[in-house]
């Protein structure tokens, strides 16, 4: 949903004025001519969530009643994956309810005139062959198009991120890859080698026959789970890691995956980033991506369920967008749902409910005292993110390594940008580009995190669009003259933060515990905000429900979750 559309003048951009005042731009740029830039907020609509607090709406009488076997609340990766698994099992009596007008959750995408672009999650590492269920999903979606003689999956070429994949910037010079090795001392290089040798040592099975780190994380060996109790910062200190280069690289990995700095990330989660998919320096795993990121995957799953974008009440679809769940009676399996398009309140009865929406919403729709986490504010914390896609007249350049798909400035608060138009044939397209900027708003304490979230949501369109262009100008002086449009997305609760003690502590166990006929299965109850975690969480919830005799199913289900 597009909101706040305005046509205004940036000092090509209005960001240039702020950058000039900060001394970021040379004097010749401070008097740059004005030009029009179109800016807008896109993505999640905060007002939609406030419907759950609307007493008048909650008191409205029921307009109709309906029944379904399984109600899935939330059409993000977890909810859609659960629906896919039900279909795979031959079970079709389910309905997916999504609050927003589009499916995808934080994997949604948007569009500028020049190109589609991601609003959040923007790639998926190629799965290892042991992740059989994920490969089957990608086969069903047309991403895997065949097998080679050894049986290894072959991917549609357009889905694989083409070279150059990554570059990083130090002192306005761009270097290949993501490791800031240029200028490293012998001591720094030796420290990096010790770190990578340590990763190789950990990339194995524990005494219980399970891998130390894997996907989903709850199927990993118990041998390393004690590392969840300490922070990644303390883990590195214990190892004697002092190199700023190596510490920055590991910190970047934590901020990129989890929206957390080293001090805020569980050591288990920090190591999981490097080891969950297997660590093989000789076999760099290609990345799968599309111009609008993982939105392409969620759209394809929804299409298999009969859903077409922009059709909230399509009768032959099992996906309903614009559907706000106002209340849930988990013992009876009854949901009251407001359908925005028809402005009707429907009482939906289900034998089982898969809650694939964010877990923190659940207390607002249950009766007081029914949620095991009620009154335990702060046990689950969420990282706010700022994401913005910028349309440019010309592709970004820079001194050193040419433009890559992922472009990261070293020791900046932001994570740089990815190029949505990276896969285009440059010989036949215009020189313009669409780039997507990512910035996690990290914080050390719950109070500071709430303040950062409030800052994100309080900032108006001009403030955040100017901020984005200023940050891009630090990487590319003069880029403000190339900006034509800016789409800004604010994610107040973008992803669960795997803080020390979360993954294998009491909080997640309580968050996942069944409540009557309801099972929570969104990414946040897994503790790690990853596509694969959401995928397997949805699968497991679907399999558990189908196998449950107490819920009236009692089917024999062969699990697709890797052991």
Image: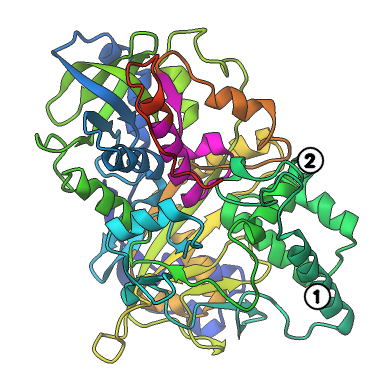
Q: Is 52 on the left or on the right of 451, as rendered? A: left
Q: Main secondary structure of the magenta part?
A: helix
Above or below, comparing residue 137 to residue 479 in the picture = above
323, 284: nearer the viewer: 284
| Element on which disc 2 rests | helix
Residue drawn at x 71%, y 37% as measured from the top left: 445
Q: Residue 193 carries which label?
A: 1
- Considering only order in the chain, which callout, 1 or 2, is on the residue closer to the N terminus? 1
The residue indicated by pointer 2 is 226
The one of 479 and 204 positioned closer to us in this rendering: 204
Q: Is mark 1 on a helix, strand or loop?
A: helix
The relative height of residue 14 versus residue 421 in the rendered view (above or below) is: above
Left or right relative to 85: residue 250: right
Badge 2: few (under 14), some or many (20 or more) residues near its Cα, within 10 Å?
Answer: few
Q: In the image, what residue occupies the spot 87% across and 84% down?
A: 186
Residue 366, given in percent of the width and then of the height, sits at: 42, 13
Where does residue 526 sit, x and y in percent of width and height? 55, 38
Q: Where is residue 550 in the image (x, y as percent from the top left)?
A: 40, 14
Relative vertical location of residue 88 with respect to residue 277 in this rendering, above or below:
above
The span shown in magenta is 518-543
Q: Can residue 52 be seen in this view?
A: yes
Tell me: 427 left or right of 380: left
Q: Which residue lies furthest to the left in this view?
A: 315
Q: Do the residues labelled 2 and 1 touch (CB within 8 Å)?
A: no
Q: How far is disc 2 from disc 1 in space, using C-alphas?
A: 25 Å
Using the image, tell me which numbered label, if any, was put on residue 448: none
Q: Does the magenta stretch include residue 534?
A: yes
Q: Position of residue 11 (x, y in %)?
A: 40, 70
Position of the C terminus by quadrant: top right
* In the depicted structure, whether residue 332 falls above or below residue 118: above
């Amino acid at each position: 949903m597009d909101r706040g559309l305005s046509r205004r003048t940036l000092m090509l951009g209005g960001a240039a004025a702020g950058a000039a005042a900060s001394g970021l731009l040379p004097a010749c740029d401070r008097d740059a001519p004005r030009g029009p830039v179109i800016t807008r907020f896109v993505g999640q609509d905060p007002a939609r969530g406030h419907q759950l607090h609307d007493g008048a709406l909650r008191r409205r009488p029921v307009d109709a009643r309906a029944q379904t076997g399984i109600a899935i609340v939330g059409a993000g990766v977890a909810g859609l994956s659960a629906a896919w698994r039900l279909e795979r099992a031959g079970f079709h009596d389910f309905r997916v309810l999504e609050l927003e007008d589009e499916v995808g959750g934080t994997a949604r995408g948007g569009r500028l005139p020049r190109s589609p672009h991601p609003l959040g999650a923007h790639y998926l590492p190629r799965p290892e062959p042991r992740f059989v269920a994920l490969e089957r999903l990608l086969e069903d979606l047309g991403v895997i198009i065949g097998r080679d003689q050894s049986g290894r999956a072959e991917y549609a070429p357009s889905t694989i991120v083409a070279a150059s994949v990554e570059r990083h910037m130090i002192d306005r010079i761009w270097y290949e890859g993501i490791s800031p090795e240029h200028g490293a001392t012998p001591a720094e290089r030796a420290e990096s080698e010790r770190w990578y040798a340590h990763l190789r040592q950990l990339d194995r099975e524990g005494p219980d026959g399970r891998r130390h780190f894997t996907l989903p994380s709850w199927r990993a060996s118990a041998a390393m789970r004690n590392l969840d109790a300490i922070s990644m910062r303390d883990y590195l200190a214990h190892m004697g890691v002092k190199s700023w280069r190596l510490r920055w690289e590991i910190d970047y990995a934590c901020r990129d995956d989890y929206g957390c700095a080293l001090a805020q990330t569980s050591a288990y989660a920090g190591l999981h980033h490097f080891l969950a998919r297997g660590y093989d320096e000789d076999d760099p795993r290609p990345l799968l991506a599309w111009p609008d990121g993982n939105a392409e995957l969620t759209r394809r799953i929804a299409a298999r369920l009969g859903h077409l974008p922009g059709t909230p009440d399509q009768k032959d679809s099992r996906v309903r967008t614009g559907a706000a769940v106002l209340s849930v009676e988990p013992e009876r399996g009854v949901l009251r749902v407001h359908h925005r398009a028809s402005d009707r309140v429907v009482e939906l009865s289900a034998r089982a409910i898969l809650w694939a929406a964010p877990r923190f919403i659940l207390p607002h729709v249950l009766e007081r005292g029914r949620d095991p986490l009620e009154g335990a504010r702060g046990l689950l914390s969420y990282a706010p993110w700022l994401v913005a896609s910028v349309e440019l007249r010309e592709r970004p350049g820079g001194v050193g390594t040419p433009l890559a798909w992922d472009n990261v400035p070293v020791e900046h608060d932001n994570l740089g940008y990815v190029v949505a138009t990276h896969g285009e044939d440059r010989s036949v397209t215009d020189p313009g580009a669409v780039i997507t900027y990512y910035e996690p708003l990290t914080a050390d304490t719950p109070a500071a995190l709430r303040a950062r979230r409030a800052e994100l949501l309080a900032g108006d369109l001009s403030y955040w669009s100017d901020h984005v262009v200023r940050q891009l100008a630090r990487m590319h002086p003069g880029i403000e003259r190339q900006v034509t449009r800016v789409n800004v997305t604010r994610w107040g609760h973008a992803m669960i933060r795997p803080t020390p003690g979360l993954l294998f502590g009491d909080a997640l166990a309580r968050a996942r515990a069944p409540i009557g006929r309801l099972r929570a299965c969104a990414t946040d109850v897994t503790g790690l905000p990853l596509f694969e975690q959401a995928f397997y969480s949805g699968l497991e919830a679907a399999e558990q429900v189908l196998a449950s005799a107490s819920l009236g199913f009692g089917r024999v289900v062969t699990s697709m979750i890797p052991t």
